[in-house]
Amino acid sequence: MRLSVQLYTLRQPLSDDLVGTLKAVKEMGLEYVELAGYQGLTAAELKKVLDDLGLKVSAGHWGLDAVKDTAQVREDARILGTKHVVLPWISEETYAAGWVEFGKELEPVARELDEHGISFSYHNHAFEFPDRGVSTFVQMWDETEDILKAQLDLGWIAVAGEDPIAWMNKLGKRAPLIHLKDFSGNKESHDAEAGKGTLDWDGILKAAEANGTEFGAIEMDQTPDEPVASVRSSVVFFQGKGLR
């Protein structure tokens, strides 16, 4: 598994100084970043900035309307040099009928992108897991085709009271991407720098190796420290575990 960072974590410093912040990421020893938007640039312009700094794109996040425009999203993915398109969030009304029904809506998107060599993943938060009296998130994965993938956000899984390692092992190769998000143990302020929370990272990294996880992206929705400093702390932790 290769190490990356979800740039949403660095949204404020990127807004203040795009090149300087990306340079700081590179100086941490990272080769990959995961995108959350194009920082006000076109895909081609952002790719040029990343190329100049020696950074590659592990995956990108696109909204529901964007991923349904499969021709455009696959062209942007081609320009950016990534084979991973991720749907990062959906509104409550989108899954109101049930998770299986929603998953079935995503299958044609996944199938079309796969025909062009691109993997399509759904990224979870914590709201997917409670039973709402309709088809469940577990059922979605049991009743959809393997062509639909997951980006498992391990921190949000823990916030929901679920076991991150169990979910990694359940989905196996259907989860080529994970978010390396530690959980403080406090659901009101849940983000922690890696190694300073409650997650079993040795067990997680063992499961990632067993399941062939391709990329693990550091992410914090709200960083405990200044964003660059919190990312650096997490990078150092995972580098100490042998990730690069």
Image (cartoon, helix red, strand yellow):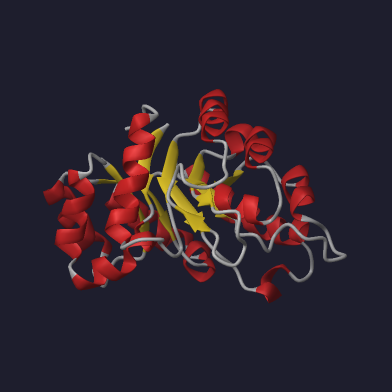
Q: Residue at x 25, y 67 (%)?
A: 13
- Residue 92, above or below 7: below
Viewer-proximal residue among 72 and 140: 140
Does residue 85 appear left or right of residue 122 in this picture? left
Does residue 103 appear left or right of residue 22 in this picture? right
Furthest residue toward right: 133
Residue 179 at x, y percent in the picture: 49, 48
Residue 192 at x, y percent in the picture: 47, 54
Furthest residue toward bottom: 93
Residue 199 at x, y percent in the picture: 57, 42
- Residue 223, above or below 163: below
Q: Hey, which quadrant is residue 6 in on the image?
A: bottom left
Does residue 54 appear left or right of residue 96 in this picture? left
Q: Residue at x 27, y 61 (%)?
A: 43
Q: Residue at x 23, y 50 (%)?
A: 25
Residue 7 at x, y percent in the picture: 34, 58
Which image quarter is the C terminus in? top left
Which image quarter is the N terminus in? top left
Q: Could one spot residue 82 in this view of the protein?
A: no
